[in-house]
Amino acid sequence: MTEALMTAPAAKAPGKPGRPGRKKRHPSVIPGFGLTLGFTVLYLSLVVLIPLSATFIKASHLTWPQLMDIVTDKQVLYAFRLSFLTAAAAALVNGVFGLLVAWVLVRYKFPGRGFLDSMVDLPFALPTAVAGIALCAVYAETGWIGALLEPIGIRVAYTPLGVIVALIFIGLPFVVRTVQPVLEDLDKEVEEAATSLGASRLQIFVKLILPAVMPSLFTGVSLAFARALGEYGSVIFISGNMPLKTEIVPLIIVSKLEQYDYAGATAVACIMLVLSFSLLLAINLLQKWAGGASRAR
């Protein structure tokens, strides 16, 4: 009996590897959290955080009175006002017509639809300076469209309206490409059911379609607004760069750099960065609140 017990295989203690009942861990194909987080932080630091930190460090060499003199200059204040107002106006226009373009591309089949769909991405591929020259040639007083608008008293080139036109051009793809996938995923059977229950087209759009696309539409408008705030190439030609009339903040920064006023340029850039980030943060918080309210309903 004693010999049998001694020669019997020893029972495996619970909790040790290889024991029955414990699932074997298989290595994941995707790298772990630590590695991916490290690469993410490194990439963002090299591309975003370090350059922005250098901007603030350069501006910190200015005293508070010097900073206030630069920021409160009449020309700089007008440039800030023009940049934010025109960017907001262009983003709102893109919100309306971007939704319309996305709706046409998703809901209708017609000859040339693929060509029109590819044309939406043209502002992404076209150099902004080329876009500015083209817009200026078209909307100038002697241009194809400008010549038609001039007799009725509408001037586009070398006016704030020209700045808005340029910002609409470069911001439209952001709205279309964020709304288009949501429209494609909408279930048409829900709309057909609403129609069978007597709902009108306006009621279906307001009650069913608009709430579904509103978060993506809000995202697209925010992206178009952010893109318009920093636009430079497509604006400098059609605006004319006239101080206290059509001069935007990016042009102010470039002008100060050309004059070797690096401290003044970085000061204006820092103020622009803080204001832009604050607005985008407020927009994102509003978007989350609106999304939470719509889910609660």
Image: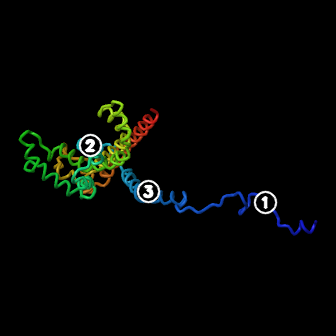
Q: Nearer the viewer, mark 3 or mark 2?
A: 2
In this image, 24 relative to 247: left or right? right
Circle 1 packing at 10 Å, graded few (<14), some (14-19), many (20+), is few
Quarter of the picture containing the C terminus is: top left
**Residue visible at 60% across and 62% down in the picture:** 26
Label 1 sits on residue: 13
In this image, 163 relative to 296: left or right? left
* Res 73 seen here: no
**Residue visible at 24% across and 52% down in the picture:** 113
Residue 133: percent from the left, percent from the top? 16, 55
Which mark is first along the chain, 2 or 3?
3
The disc label shown at residue 44, or none: 3
- Please name the amino acid that badge 3 sits on: Leu
- Please name the amino acid that badge 2 sits on: Leu
Residue 242: percent from the left, percent from the top? 17, 47
Label 2 sits on residue: 100
The disc label shown at residue 2, or none: none
Count the labels in the image. 3
Residue nearer the viewer, 23 or 239 = 23
